[in-house]
Image (cartoon, rainbow, N blue to C red):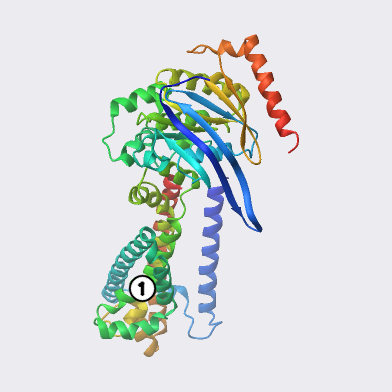
Amino acid sequence: MLMSVSEAIVVSKVSKRFALAGSGEGVLALSELSLSIGAGEFVAILGPSGCGKSTLLRLVAALEQPTGGTVTVRGEPPGKVSANHALGVAFQDHALLPWLSIHDNIALPFKIAGRRADEAAIARLIELVGLSRFTRARPKQLSGGMRQRASIARALVLEPEVLLLDEPFGALDAVTRRQMNVELQRIWSARQITTMLITHSVDEALFLADRVVVMSGRPGRILREVDVPFERPRDPAVTRSERFHRMVDDLTAALETEEAPL
Amino acid sequence: MSAAARSVLLGGLGIGLFLALWETIGLFKLAGISWPPLSAVLEMLTDGSRLPLFQRALAATLEETALGYLWGTGAGIALAALAHLVPLLRRGSDRLAAVLNSVPSIALGPIFLVLLNRESTPAAVSSIHVFFIVFVSVSSGLQRATAAHRDLFAVLGADRFKRFRRLELPAALPALVSGLRLAWPAALIGAIIGEWFGAPRGIGILIINAMQNFQIVLLWCAVLLAVASSLLIYGLLTLLERTAYARFG
């Protein structure tokens, strides 16, 4: 495990129970889960659907409150961090505002934070995600991949302390998804922000992350943690290496044994 | 033929058929003497000597309607926004609006007459009609922002006012414009009813006078004026609504 001097995200014995109509005890989505992510570390959370991995991200994003245990981001409760506009987030749904241009969507976090939009930073990011020709376009006019790139640019524009990615490429086709992974790897290598990526794609997790955490479902627990040995910046060629394939097979098997009884 | 052209053609055909039927029934007195042919109504409407009368009446009614429309819209948006931002007020404002709507405007007329004056009563009744429609449409429109957008604003640290201004209000615009479209005919009806409580002039006064003096053709003229002005502005608002949905929907 990559040891960092400071832990950016600490999840400590967290449980989350959702109320369910007709069931007194509800559904236990997470059970005494502990995980810490170091400053500048990229961690991918891998798991079958319904294993509570999105719930974990929502707890770190202060969108949910834990039933038991604590979550801290840089030593503070997540709600305080988000109120300080220090979180960046991208969901599977790009969540761009349909009435704003791409430029204005990416500038939105400045408006919410009540800061003056840093036009130079916005332009650099738009350039970085390859949307320079589309700054005045509306989200509706762009392809799915372009919208996700815009939503990642929006997540990065305030230089957040923590970046939260909830299956940002989950709705894309395989080819676009691969391209987006390559781009995200390039973008992330330029900044190295503490990142938590939720995904169900083994390839994606291994290509992007420093560490892969495999979760089991119902209730969500950590099954395995694997350090990813590949050097950065990573070339897409790495995904064709023998070692990469072996790790994919290994993690896929771990996921399958977990999914079998469901 | 394109679908749009077809729909325009069919619509035109329908209106033409309706007008021809009106003319035929009137011409042969199929519905008795109280149904004049369209040509007689149009003849009176375009009669030079009566033109000032129609102009004055229409101008007065449209002015009252516009005034009531503006007041009602302003009050509807303001109360819906306030109720949205201050959850404590939400239930109370819903009930207030429902109660106001359940009082027939014919019963409100005399109250306004006492509270205000006979000149302001048409606009006041009209504004009550508009208020309810706009309040309901804006209230529901403010709930229309998607869960993903709400999550995004929460994670970015937006307080409720920033969320309101940058997310909920723009997302509510299509619903507001739909409300505005529906509110216009209601505003016109409100103004006409309001005029019956003693306004000095207006389409409503024209209707009452024509009715009491058995001036059948004049009565139809007044009704036709009311319908035409209502439809015209309703049509313009429909165009505005389409634009709003294309941009904000």
- Mark 1 Cα-neighbour bin, 10 Å: few <14, some 14–19, many ≥20: many
In the rendering, at what x and y percent does residue A177 appear? 57, 25
Whether residue B133 is visible, yes or no, is: yes
Amino acid type, callout 1: Ile
When the figure is inspected, residue A189 is found, relative to residue A255, above or below; the finding is above
Picture quadrant where residue B77 is located: bottom left
User: Looking at the rendering, which quadrant does residue A207 occupy?
Assistant: top right
Image quadrant holding the N terminus of chain B, namely top right
Residue at 37% across / 81% down in the picture? Answer: B207
Between A77 and B65, which is closer to the camera in this rendering? A77
For the point 29% across and 76% down, the residue is B50
Residue in front for this viewpoint, B195 or B104: B104
Which residue is painted at 53% across and 36% down in the image? A92
Could you tell me which secondary element the residue under label 1 belongs to? helix
Identify the residue under disc 1. Answer: B128
The percent coordinates of residue B16 (x first, y second) are 52, 64
Viewed as shown, does residue A139 lie left or right of A239? left
- Residue depicted at x 53% and y 45%: A68
On the image, the x and y values in percent for residue A105 come to 39, 36
Q: Is residue B46 above or below residue A2?
A: below
Residue B225 makes an appearance in the image: no
Is residue B24 toward the left or the right of residue A217 in the image? left
Looking at the rendered structure, the number of numbered marks drawn on it comes to 1
Q: Position of residue A162 (x, y in %)?
A: 42, 31
In this rendering, would B46 be left or right of A237? left
Q: Nearer the viewer, residue A39 or A141?
A: A39
Question: Which chain does the numbered disc 1 sit on?
Answer: B
Residue B212's place in the image compared with B138, above or below, is below
